[in-house]
């Protein structure tokens, strides 16, 4: 199971709260999701990747909220953000169909089961 620092956990909570205010689900993707599904495999990553269930217009509001909080968007990688605490996250708009569980592989039940474990870790795991 991936371990997160206190700063990363605080930033994950902030992203979750902004997304919830916009009615959007978050889905962990990338290396962190890989580590959850294959815990025996060692795979290092310097960021946390998310698909966000927002269309591009709604995603612009999330970007405004992050900027207001002091997050910085990388100039040469528009999907990459750095929080004021230094957490790097890649945020990809996945459209609202993700939150409705339509025909989208990100919304299948096994992913939600694993994400539930990650969400629990955000709340219960000590900083690593």
Image: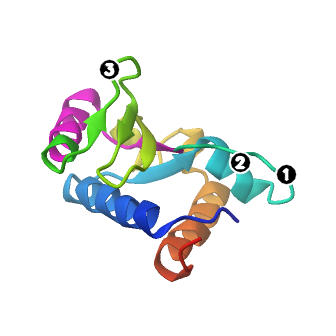
- Determine which residue is flagged by label 1: 41
Q: Element at badge 2?
A: helix
Circles 2 and 1: CB distance less than 8 Å? yes
Residue at 53% from the left image edge and 43% from the top image edge: 47
Q: Earlier in the sequence, mark 2 or mark 1?
A: 2
Residue 106 vs residue 123: left or right? right
x and y percentages locating residue 117 in the rendered image: 61, 71
Circles 1 and 3: CB distance less than 8 Å? no
State how far apart marks 2 and 1 are (Cα). 9 Å
Q: Element at badge 1?
A: loop
Q: Nearer the viewer, residue 106 or 66?
A: 66
Up-down: is 91 above or below 111? above
- Determine which residue is flagged by label 3: 75
State how far apart marks 1 and 3 are (Cα). 32 Å
Q: Nearer the viewer, residue 113 or 61?
A: 61
x and y percentages locating residue 22 in the rendered image: 21, 52
Up-down: is 109 above or below 128? above
1 vs 3, front mark:
3
Q: Nearer the viewer, residue 2 or 114?
A: 2
- Determine which residue is flagged by label 2: 34
Near mark 3 (Cα within 10 A), the count class, few <14, some 14-19 or many ≥20, is: few
Quarter of the image where one finds residue 96: top left
Q: Element at badge 3?
A: loop
Residue at 60% from the left image edge and 51% from the top image edge: 108
The segment highlighted magenta reads 48-65
Circles 2 and 3: CB distance less than 8 Å? no
Q: Earlier in the sequence, mark 2 or mark 3?
A: 2
Q: Look at the image and say whether residue 61 sits in the magenta stretch.
A: yes
């Amino acid at each position: 199971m991936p371990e997160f620092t206190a700063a990363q956990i605080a930033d994950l909570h902030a992203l979750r709260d902004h997304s919830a205010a916009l009615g959007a689900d978050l889905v962990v993707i990338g290396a962190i999701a890989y580590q959850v599904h294959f815990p025996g495999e060692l795979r290092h990553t310097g960021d946390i990747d998310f698909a966000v269930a927002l269309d591009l217009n709604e995603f612009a509001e999330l970007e405004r909220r992050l900027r207001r909080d002091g997050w910085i968007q990388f100039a040469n990688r528009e999907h990459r953000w750095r929080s004021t605490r230094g957490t790097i996250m890649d945020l990809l708009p996945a459209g609202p169909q993700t939150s409705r569980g339509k025909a989208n592989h990100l919304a299948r039940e096994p992913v939600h089961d694993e994400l539930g474990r990650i969400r629990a870790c955000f709340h219960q795991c000590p900083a690593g």
